[in-house]
Amino acid sequence: MTQATIDGRGRAARASIGKDARGGREQARRAPGLVPTIILIVGSLYCVLPVLWILIASTKSNGELFSTPPLLPSFSGSFWDNLAGILTYDNGIWLRWALNTVIYAVGGGLVSTLIAGAAGYALGKYTFWGSKTIFRTIVAAVLLPPVLLAVPQYLLLAQVGLTNTYWSVLLPQLVSPFAIYLCKIYAEASVPDEIVEAARIDGASEWRIFHSVGLRLMFPALITVFLIQFIAVWNNFLLPFVMLSNNELYPLTLGMYGMIMPTGGQPNQYSLVIAGVLLSIVPLAIIFLSLQRFWKIDLLSGGVKL
């Protein structure tokens, strides 16, 4: 058997193996499996049905809300009446609650992201005395449920006279252990030591390196942290409930909760509250859809590496 024949048979065998492998991969892509499909469908319904119910319920009056099928919309014109009702309720107090929510969510989200980015970069790129202890303390703080911290935070802020103010809702949310943890992981994975050392050799200060190099490379993680913090503050109920007693400082969650409580002989405003919930979802959807392209799988892979 000649050498040319042996080489030809080898190439044919490798081509056959490659063809089989490609065929296997294509078959795997074409057949995802029944169980994953069912899980995805159930998960999608779990997420979509509450939003769909809110959209349908906002088309009904109080009477229709309890006398018609839950997933059957009403075309009696109650949708526009509910929107007008929630926007003019108590001289437009809903708009005041919406403005308060924007202040709490945007202010708290931005400052919390900056603090988490700086702390995460410091813990991820510098080794100093106590850094490991600080990081372990932060990881332990992630495990604490917020409900345990609400009363101690109220007592501390009451000592300095900040309860029932904007600061009583903003200050406790400026430092997030989970956000610092994410930024620390991402800084270790996305900011190479070689670039930091090259910047130092070029004479850049540590602040300049953090501002010009670290923050730019960590930008996807910072957007993710801001989005998480924004949604958490927007939907927060417990902290404002503990801290605030003036209804002009209420966020949307606490304000609309008061509308469905039977106080002073007033009827429960279920249809108006549902319309208000529908309006409060719109900013969240816009921000989430506009920022979702910054979500990076690298953030999760960095957490797995640790």
Image: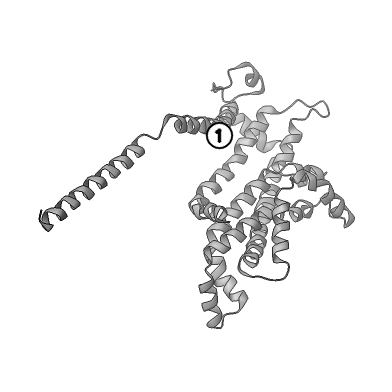
Q: Look at the image and tell me in which quarter the C terminus lies.
A: bottom right
Quadrant of residue 20 within the rendered picture: top left
Indicate the position of residue 98 as horizontal and vertical percent values.
67, 45
In the image, taking residue 26 as reference, residue 210 lies left or right, namely right
Front-most of 125 and 209?
125
Task: Compare residues 101 and 121 and report the one nearer the observer.
Answer: 121
In the figure, 239 relative to 71: above or below? below
- Tell me where residue 3 appears, x and y as whole percent: 12, 58
Q: Residue furthest front?
A: 1
- Residue 85's place in the image compared with 199, above or below, is above
Taking the image as drawn, is residue 152 in sight? yes
Q: How many marks?
A: 1
Residue 153 position in % (x across, y down): 82, 51
Other residues around mark 1 within 10 Å, as few (<14) / some (14–19) / many (≥20): few
**Which of the 4 image quadrants contains residue 240?**
top right
Residue at position x 61%, y 76% in the image: 206
Q: Which residue is mark 1?
A: 47
Query: Three-letter amino acid code at disc 1?
Result: Cys
- On screen, 57 above or below 154? above
Q: Position of residue 96 (x, y in %)?
A: 71, 45
